[in-house]
Each structure stands twice: as structure tokens, then as C-alpha cells.
Amino acid sequence: MLTIGTAGHIDHGKSAVVKRMTGTDPDRLPEEKSRGMTIDLGFAFMSSSSGEEIGFVDVPGHERFVRNMIAGVGGIDVVMLVVAADDGWMPQSEEHFQIIRLLGITRGLIVINKIDLVDDDWLQLLTEDVKEKVKGSFLAEAPIFAVSAATGAGFEPLIAYLKDLPAQIASSRDIDQARLYIDRSFIRPGIGKVVAGTLRGGSLSVGQAISVWPGNHRGKVRSLQSNSREVERATPGQRTALSVTGVDKEYLLRGGCISDRTDLSFFRDHPVLAMSVELLANSPVTLADRRRVLLITGTTEVEGEIRVFQQKTIAPSTKGVVFFKPDEPPFTLIGDHYIMRLPTPMVTLGGGRVLDHLDRFPRRKTYAAMEYLNERMSGNLEDLIVSELKKRVIAPVDDFLKDADHSRNDILKIIERLTKEKTAGRHDKYVFLNEELEQAKEQFHASILRFLEDKPHLKGLSADELARASKLNKGLTAALVSYMVSTGEMVRMADRYNLVGRGMSLKGELKKAHDQIMAALKSEPYTPPRLTDLAKGGKNFREAIKYVLEAGEGYKCGSEFVFLPEVWDEILVFIKNHLAEKDFLNVADLKNRFGFTRKFAIPILEETDRTGLTQRQGDIRVKGNRFEK
């Protein structure tokens, strides 16, 4: 379904034009009819030449109801800007025009109404004035229709044009991320609470699991209506009403959102928005840190505080990037448009796009790492992808930009092209920019070497230690390590990792502790001191023990003893030969050969049981499942 939204100054006849075309009066509230003005959103429908339905969203023109106007425009495909011939271009004409421009509407038409009240010369002058007002915008080449809603004059070409529009404009985007920003909420007898809005981004079906924002409440779609008809499935662009099970009616309110995502906790945990902003020429204020503003996106309105990125201020008629910390987190995706207003007086300042989600206001010392935000100002998907890879360096493909207003297929197509062009690369489940990854690896390598400068005895580091040493988050560290292991730049040893080519060494007090330990092992090779006794020497002795084991200078037997490698090999050779000759072994055999007491013999046999060389049967040992002669 194609959705057309009206825009224009109060009393310029938006509702009358819609009624003349559809036969439906979009002013549905008694108060609207009595006052002769649209207060809330109104809806009407007609069929196109091909039989496809065209929906009209009639929005208020009075300055006090601009927020409702923004709610209506947020889900439209085409705007119909209505200007009264007798009044001409008025303040709300300008404000509505700027709002629809800032909301990213790219297709529209202009209707000059009330031509029965002016002569042809005036109409010609007004038409030229309107063309001048929209010059350089998306409406610069838009068709202009002159009509009279009172007499019906001029409607035939207008209706013919609108009926052919669905064949010229692609249907609303389906990115497999359904969202319905609630613009109406009411009670329906026999059903209960019903919410309505224009469905965007994906489809909803009866019985489907959904989440309700705010609050991340989970439920299911009980029933669906599209244009007053019961349906099993609603598609993007349709005016949709639905009832929900599993969610209390107190949470189903105008300004909320229905989503097909079953977990929206990400948006609660990342409430701060990085946003592009364009201030209107007539903005009464300059944006500076700590300014409180009102953000409107979809039907959601939320106040909050801003910080300006890289500039001290953003003046009227200029653009920039700001960080917005809302009083309550909104549900909005990267790429969504918004309008910014003053909380009081209610004046439109400007608008822009959401660029990223952050968990807090960033500190100024981290601004250099956030240069990627400037690349997103274009609104281009490839720029978004490249900037995300600059931000994350190496990222899992599965959840890449899943919180952006783009389809996964479109994202993967561009990644595939960038990979073919050798700009990007793929490894396992990860994607990266080749140049950025090389720089990251160099920095990672250098940070690990610096960390190990005074720890040359360590054979490697755990994943957590690598993250601490590099000062990178654990996700990025794991991705870098995975890639560097695959390219042979790092080696994995059990749960530790080391840089290839990096040796181990000792110095200072650590070397002294090491030498004392080795002297003790050599002086009593068959009756070494307990590990606990060796460790009593302090931190250097504990580190030295770790080095002895990792460097292969000692073999740990159970939890108590360390034998010199050659001594342990001698013990193993005896056990193998004895079992090969007699098929069993007991404690006395070890005692007779090496002079071991049970203090040593028992731990030795428990260790050979663990490795599979021997197997215990009562008081004797026999060949284990890994015995080899």
C-alpha cells in the first residue's frame, strides 16, 4: 500500500482535499468537526488504477499540533503539500515543508487549494512563489495541481496522477525488521486494547511473538486489521491495527512501538544517541553542551540533554554531530530520521539521522576514536558499513549492523563487493577492512610485547590477560587473536596465547628464585621439595615455578611435586619396562628401584593413571589404555 501524507498551514484545506478525493472525512473527532481543524491524525483510502490501495494520512496544521503532524509524516511514502490560494505560503507551510525535508521524504506533490477564491493572475504569481520556496529541494520538480475542494475544480488530473503513483514508486521497504509506532490506542468491545499505526520495515502475522517498547514487554499478536479488514498478515506501508496478548493494556500507549524483535534490551543498555543534526535557518537557538531539547522520532517524544561533537556550538543553518542523552531511552535504529524541538516554547530547531547507539556520553579524550561518525553523515549504506568496520576493526558477520535501518541482504551485498575489491576481507565468521586490520595488528603486537617486557618468563597470556594488556574489549581481542592464530602470527597453547618467535627468559630477582628452585630439584632429584614449600619464597618464586613448568624445565606430578624432565623420563621408562615384562606393578617396585616412600610413589602412580600409562586394579597397576612399549 502506498501511503500519502498531507502537510500545510492550518485551514488551507488539507482534510477537504482528501475528502473530495476519497469520500471520507479524515476529521474523525467531534472536537475537530466543531472547531473546523484537524487536531489528531486522520485516515482515508482510495484504490489506484491497478487496484492497489492508497492510504492518506491527514495531519494537523496548527502550530500546537506539529508533534502530531510529525507522527503522521514518519510513516509515509509521498507528501502532498497543500497551500491555500488566498493565503499563500504561511508559517506552518514553511515549518511543515522543513520537517518533511528533514524526515527524509524524497517524493511529493504540491496542491494549491481554494482557487475559486482568486483570479488567474494571482494564481500564476502564487505558483511561481511556491516554486521559489521549494527550489533546490526534493519538491523542486514536483508537479503542482490547482484545485478547489469546495467546487471540485481541478481534481480530475490530481486523482489521475495519484492513482498512477503506485506503479511509479517502489512499495515500502521490507528489511525484515517490523516496527509499528503507535499513533492511536483505543478499546474495542470484545477485543480490548487495540493499537494502530503505519507498519514499516517488515511484516506482522497473527500469532507472531513481538515486543512492546518502552519496557521491553513481550507478547503475541492476537489479531490484525488493515484498513478496517481482518487480515492474517500485514505488510510494510499498511495502516495496521492489532490487539496483543501477554502485555498489560497500560503499556500499549501512543508513542510506544511494536517490534518483531523479541529482545529490545540493547536499546535500554545503549540509551545515548549519536546523531547528525541540521539546524534550520530560523532556529531561535544555537546548540551547545547541556542544552535540553525534545526529540521526536516515529510517534515517540522524549526530552534529554545534548553534547556537541568536535565543535563548541552548532549555529542556525549549519550541520554537525551531537550526542543526545534522553530522560527515557527511545527505540530507534541507526539511519532513522528525527525532529528536534525546544521543550518550551515548542519551536522546531532542526533534525537529522541517528548515527549510533552508545551506553553513555563519550569523554572528549575519546573523540578521536569517534571520527567514524562523520562518515555516516552522508546517509549512504556503504559509508555506514565502512565506518562500522573502522569503529570495530574486525566484527562478526552474523550480527553486523543488526541495529540499523537496513536489510541484511543489502549489507551482505556491499560486504561481498568490498571483499572482491580487496578493500575488505573475511576470516571465519569475521569481516574487516584490510588496511585497518593491519594497523590494529601492529598496535596489538606492540602492546603485548610492552606488557611482557618485565615478564619475559611467561610462555603466553590468557584471553583476559591479552585484553588487559592491549586495552581492547574482549570481543575485539578474541577476534584479533583468532585471526592472528590462523595466519601463524600467534600460537595457542591450551588456554594461553603467545606471539610467534617470542622466546622466554629470566632476569633479576626472578632469575635468582629460578636458580634456587632448579638447584633444589637437582640436589634431590628423586625426593624434590613440595610445591607449597617452594612457593613460600614469595611472588618471584611462584612466578619462577610457573616458568619452570611452561619452559619444560620441570614436570608437575599431581599437585605436590615437580621432577626434572630427565628424572621423570627415567621413572616412565622403568614403569614401561616393568609392565612389559611382568604385566603388573606395585608401590614396592618403585620403592626398590628409586628408594621412594609412599609419599612420592602414590602421587607418581596416580599421575600415570591420569595419563593412561597405567590403570589401577586394587593395590597393583596394569597397562593403561595409552600404554605403549
Image (cartoon, rainbow, N blue to C red):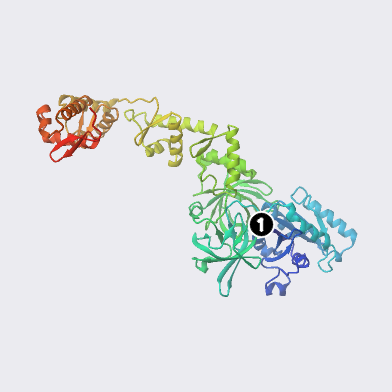
Quarter holding the C terminus is top left
**Which residue sits at x=28%, y=30%?**
547
Q: Position of residue 104 (x, y in %)?
A: 67, 51
Q: Which of these two is toward me, 236 or 12?
A: 236
Q: Which of these two is toward me, 365 or 460?
A: 460
Q: Is residue 454 left or right of residue 206?
A: left
Q: Which of these two is toward me, 244 or 109?
A: 244
Q: Is residue 6 left or right of residue 249?
A: right
Q: How many marks?
A: 1
Question: In what element is the residue under mark 1?
Answer: strand
* Circle 1: residue type: Thr
Above or below — where is 585 with respect to 63? above
Q: Which of these two is toward me, 540 or 79?
A: 79
Among the 4 quarters of the image, the one containing residue 231 = bottom right
Q: Mark 1 highlights which residue?
A: 348
Above or below — where is 74 with respect to 11? above
**Which residue sits at x=49%, y=61%?**
218
**Which residue sits at x=83%, y=59%?**
157
Q: Is residue 337 left or right of residue 112?
A: left
Above or below — where is 379 with respect to 55? above
Q: Position of residue 325 (x, y in %)?
A: 53, 53
Quarter holding the N terminus is bottom right
Q: Is residue 569 visible?
A: yes
Above or below — where is 603 with respect to 156? above
